[in-house]
Amino acid sequence: IYIDPYGKERIYRRLASSFPREPKYAKPHPSSVNIGDLQDLIAKSENNTISSFLKENFVRISSKTSKQIIEIAEKDLQDKISFLILKEGFVNIVQKKTQNIHFLKYEKRIFGRSTKPRDKLIIYKVDSEDLREKYWDIILKYIKNDKDQEKSYKAIQKFNNQIEKAEKVSEKRNIEKEKKKILNIIEKITNEKENIKLELNDLFKTNQTGLIELKKMINRNDFESLVNEVQLSKVKPADLTKSQFDSLFLAFKSIKYMAPPTDTAIPVGDSILENTLIKEIGLKISDSADDFDTPLETIYQTEEIIKKINQNIIDKKDLGAYSDLNENLVDLNDIVNLSSEILRHLNILENKLDPQQIKQNIDEILTITGGESSESYSGVYEYFTDNYTKDDDFVAAETRNPTSGKGLAYVVEAVIAYSKALETPKRSRDVLSRFVNRTPKLRDSADCAITKAVQSVNWKNYNLEVYDNGLPKGPIKLLVNVSGPFVHLMFKSQSKNALADDDELIKEMKYCLEAIGRRLRVYINRRENLYKNQKRASLIEKYIPKFAESVYNIASKGESKFKSILNMKEIIDLMKGAIGKKTVPIVPQQVISKEPEIKLTEIVKEDKTEKEILIKAKDVIRKEKPVKDDIAVPKIDSPKVIFSKKTYLNWTIKELKDYCKEKNIPITSKLRKADIVEKILASPLPKEVAGISKITIYEKPEKKEKILAAPTIVDLKPSKVSFKKPPIKPKSQPPLLKPKPVQSTLPIITTQGIMKVLSNEMQTIKHLIFKLKIKDMMDARYLQLKLKELERKGQVIVELRMGRKHWKLK
């Protein structure tokens, strides 16, 4: 609601009835983190181990994954500094035979002021020649594998460059196959290197005599620093050196992770996008013309309500607003009866259960027999198509399932509107509206990934022409929105007007647009078929008299069985009816053959016409099967329609007051909405029907009949009953809920219509809205835009009087 400076109140109708779901916070995904972000997180970390740092600061990293990252980083460090971690110690890698070989391990020793043994790093030197030869033979294999591994990594880098330059998909597949072979070779080399480490560990374990302990060493600190450097699992994140960080980042990026959570990307929604274009453009859309299903949201809400009711029943609480829904729940007796029907053919005495027999019983019970065929509904569909949806415009929206790219989630959605009332844009950029996180992007459209995705769709497959740049051409409006944190990484510049190219992002947008395009193609083909049928029907209609005359002449000659019933006018009417406007089809209903038993238990007054009154009362209360009779029935008022409290709360105060006035419910003008609803719910039901005395009628038969009905009380007054033939009345319709006042058909605001309304006298926009019968704020806004356009063209004159604009013809 907006109140302008002149005190006038303006109401803008909501397009959405609820707020969008809030996106949930998610930790960074490893694949979206660059080296700078990881450095910042490590510098501010207060964790004691690398493993805890990885699990607490990133999503999709478990204990197993963090352990795998640390192992890969430690292997890379070992090869860099030539210092291996063995199962029971450490050993250096020598490149020449003349270099000293040192073996290090932790042993329990008493040192310092402590009297208890503690772990101390002991350094040994390999002194035995035999041990040195064995060590050299083993380490040569390790060095050879290390060189082969480096060559394989270089080959993979070449393959990655070739994949980026490859243009054909077949070339990329072939390169991927070769790359996969190299990766298998690298995996074999890594396993061989681990086996070599085990051989070295066994070698030093079995040859302790060839080792000499070095107690006094000048460079002891160097060996201790090597041990600390290579053991990445025991280092605090804040104490990482440059080489350690490089190895950690390499391992961090070399692992494949699970996709990030998708609840961080929240779409606008199909219905909101469609309603936006319907109101903005002024499309003509029939209500529920093609959609006969129940929205999933409604099903989910109903399921939640039923769960709440069951919980309230367990807690013995008041059901309150759910009382009307509770009445429709399945009764325990119904469950028992259904189970009995399923199990009635089983032979319990023989203790044999036949699964096929049980399945057959279930199929027989659940199969609907005597229902309506699909052909009976085809006539209904054709009738609605010809009479209601024939001139409708097209609007359809599609929301893709959330996906991820570069470690961040995003969701793509689009909407297309097609209407003959729209003018074909002269410029291609006027067709497409780009949105990123619900924000419109107005510049750099040619260099945006959204535009390239729209251009990649073959619009000719969907009966649309295209501009030179590949965008669709015609009376069409296209809107694409990309939501999610992923887009923040994809902006090309700081102006944030265009998204960078990404194969997965463009593919998602293309699939979304193609899904809507298929529906648009169905709509256009249907319109073309209707036009062809109308054209063909109008052509045939001209020659119907000649056709009818020919048929009449042929059938009237000879001894035809139709000769006695021939009628020229009837033949013409039948032929015109076959191609003319379709009448309302009637779907056959299932008739209950068995008539329920009716009991009359109490009669208040009796006189000479008692038998006739009882017979007529019996006929009046029959609901399943109407009986034709010449005896007149007293007029009985229809029962009072009672809505639920939730329905009343959805009405406006004005609607509630009108309803109270219609039903003679006394209320005051100062009552609030909730109080009015309580007054309506507390109002008594009509207890008497004029013209009939009291008769208690039980429509509920015995349990064998399985027909349940509530008792009805009817009053009978024989003196006022008149026995006349009742007039034929139209079939009564079930009571419908009072709809909200919604403008179903939008007025057509055109330049010609505005020019007809304008005159040589000055008029405000209020007069023009009244003359054009506008009831919606969006239409009034569109009228203002049209008047500005006429003002620019010089077709109308505008004057400002008392702060308000007045228009007249020039």
Image (tube, rainbow, N blue to C red):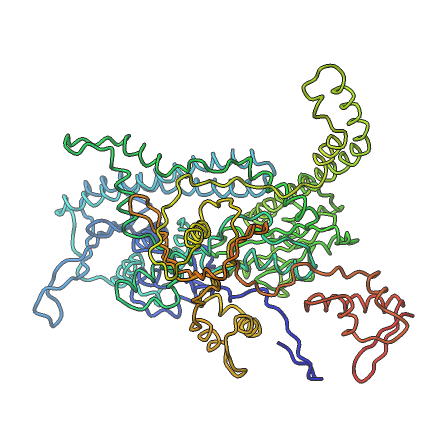
The N terminus, quarter of image = bottom right
Q: Nearer the viewer, residue 287 or 10?
A: 287
Residue 327 lies in quadrant: bottom left
Residue 427 is situated, as x and y percent measured from the top left of the image, at: 77, 54
Q: Nearer the viewer, residue 612 or 43?
A: 612
In this orientation, does residue 244 appear? Answer: no
* In-image side of 218 versus 329 (left or right): left
**Residue at position x 26%, y 66% from top?**
315
Q: Nearer the viewer, residue 756 or 283?
A: 756
Residue 273 lies in quadrant: bottom right
**Residue at position x 47%, y 42% from top?**
154
In the rendered view, tell whether residue 536 sits above or below residue 421.
above
Q: Nearer the viewer, residue 430 or 574?
A: 574
- Point out the residue furthest to the left here: 115
Residue 310 lies in quadrant: bottom left
The C terminus, quarter of image = bottom right
In this orientation, does residue 556 appear? Answer: yes
Residue 510 is situated, as x and y percent measured from the top left of the image, at: 60, 46
All told, the count of numbered labels is: 0
- Point out the residue furthest to the front here: 608
**Residue at position x 28%, y 30% from top?**
356
* In-image side of 580 versus 63 (left or right): right
Residue 266 is situated, as x and y percent measured from the top left of the image, at: 50, 60
In the rendered view, tell whether residue 691 sits above or below residue 518.
below
In the rendered view, tell whether residue 148 sits above or below residue 548.
below
Residue 778 is situated, as x and y percent measured from the top left of the image, at: 69, 66
